[in-house]
Amino acid sequence: MMAAGPNGGTGSDIRGQVMPSGARTAELVGLPLFGVVFAMSVREYGGPGAFAWIAGALSLIAIAMSVPKLKRTHFIFIAIGIALTLTAILTRPDWAQGVGRAILGGSLVIGVFTALSALRSAAVGSQEILECGRFLARQPPGLRYAALTMGGHLFGLILLYGAISLLGSLATESTASEPDPEIRYHRTRRMLVAIQRGFISTLTWSPMAFSMVISVALVPGASWGAAVLPCLISAAIMLVGGWALDTIFKPRLSHPPPPRAVEAGSWWLNLRPLLMLLGAVVGGTALLHFVTGVAVIGAVMSLIPVVALIWVWLQALGQHLSPQSHLGTRVKQYLLTEVPGYRGEIALLFMAAVIGSLGSFLLAPLVASHGVDLSAVPALAVLIPLIWLIVLAGQIGMNPILAVSLIIPLLPAPAAMGVSPSAVVAAITAGWALSGATSPFTASVLLLGALGKVSPRRAGLVWNGPYILIVGAILSLWVTLLALWL
């Protein structure tokens, strides 16, 4: 990919352009990041504690290697993290434990992100997956919202918010040729919100979503296996609620729309590649979790890169290419080109987890010293405001990772509140998903605004405001029932 200059201070990229040594170092960030994936996976499977230290060290190395390419926003987060670390060192005798836990939490987040980005990379090279997205976007008006919101959900399980980018691009591509501006606007808006709402509903239950990963890690006694069924109902509420609201409040055009050709493609043939992949990913993750007893996060980090490699291998066979050569090329491209492109996101995710954890570590004794005892408060007076607090935090720019990492350690354990850990997880993931639909600072809303050519605040609060209020109220009722029943 790049070669050292004669004095070792510069390199050149594949176009022969001279690159500063700092930029060249930033291009190699994929190597320590996959070291984090390996070390965290070993730790999750019961390996020696030294692997936690290795993962933390590699994470810090990856952030340091990324520095030459980071933006001012990233440095603000890094500065806050450093300030909190120094404060912990100066004020807490047990600072090493708090700082170590924060770095480990950050390592967990970027390990998951790196593993999942491998699957996203494999998906981009699959023509079958692209054709599946086009098939969903071509559905007639009466079926289009349901098709795209389920497509956003299924694609989101694999691609995270890349599902919005992929399906959203295909949706806008399908409406670009519409000559009537009124029809084009309404069709584009409805298609994009269907995709986004489908994606955010994955945040309530997916074992690969940060919402579930962090919730299970922070809530004492929680596990994905115990929480998945009630959280799947949360997802159903978001999916069905979005479809119902779209149907009820369907925009009325000033003139009848022209007739459209009926899509004749087979649902099974077009969706089969996606469903088979989902079976391998979600089914394999669940199988590893239940058979080996490893936490779901360990199953995700160890399984997903393997699935991605097998998928790329099968793609080569389907294109009559040499599997070994194609796989080697794609791995090199992924590690040296694609992963470095995520360096800003990785820095923000790592620092959000670190800041949230250290903030909670520093705040906990202050809260206790002021006599605040939330265990004496009724559980519902904690869980329901928790949902909406996460949503409101998103409106002022707090990443849900930061907000949840900061808030949850300050709350009483589920046993002290007299509720099931699964009810707490359901509340957190519901708030996280609602924030993902409305916060103008989240990737999902930023993508929605960019694709729809509107501001992120309009995309989040105007396009999704009524949806969030109505569906959020139903989710609050659902969490109430869980707190009383479980």
Image (cartoon, rainbow, N blue to C red):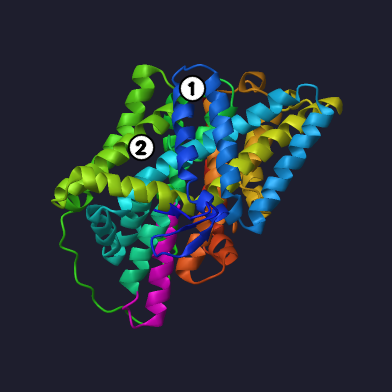
In the rendering, at what x and y percent does residue 182 appear? 41, 79
**To which residue does mark 2 refer?**
305
- In this orientation, which residue lies closer to the viewer: 353 or 219? 353
Residue at the image point whose x is 58% and y is 61% from the top:
461
SS of the residue at dot 2?
helix
* Above/below status of 311 relative to 419: below
Residue at the image point whose x is 43% and y is 59% from the top:
13
Instruction: Characterize the local packing of mark 2: few (<14), some (14-19) or many (20 or more) Cα atoms within 10 angstroms.
Output: many
Question: Magenta segment: does it hold 195?
Answer: yes
- Do the CB atoms of the residues marked 2 and 1 lie less than 8 Å apart? no
- In this orientation, which residue lies closer to the viewer: 113 or 323? 323
Amino acid type for the residue under numbered disc 1: Arg
* Above/below status of 87 relative to 132: above
Residue 64 showing in the rendered view: yes
Which corner quadrant of the image does residue 124 belong to? bottom left
Amino acid type for the residue under numbered disc 2: Pro
In the rendering, at what x and y percent does residue 245 appear? 45, 57
In magenta, the rendered stretch is 176-197
- In this orientation, which residue lies closer to the viewer: 282 or 414? 282
Residue 483 showing in the rendered view: no
- In this orientation, which residue lies closer to the viewer: 217 or 425? 217
Instruction: Characterize the local packing of mark 1: few (<14), some (14-19) or many (20 or more) Cα atoms within 10 angstroms.
Output: some
**To which residue does mark 1 refer?**
43
Distance (Cα) linking label 2 and label 1:
17 Å
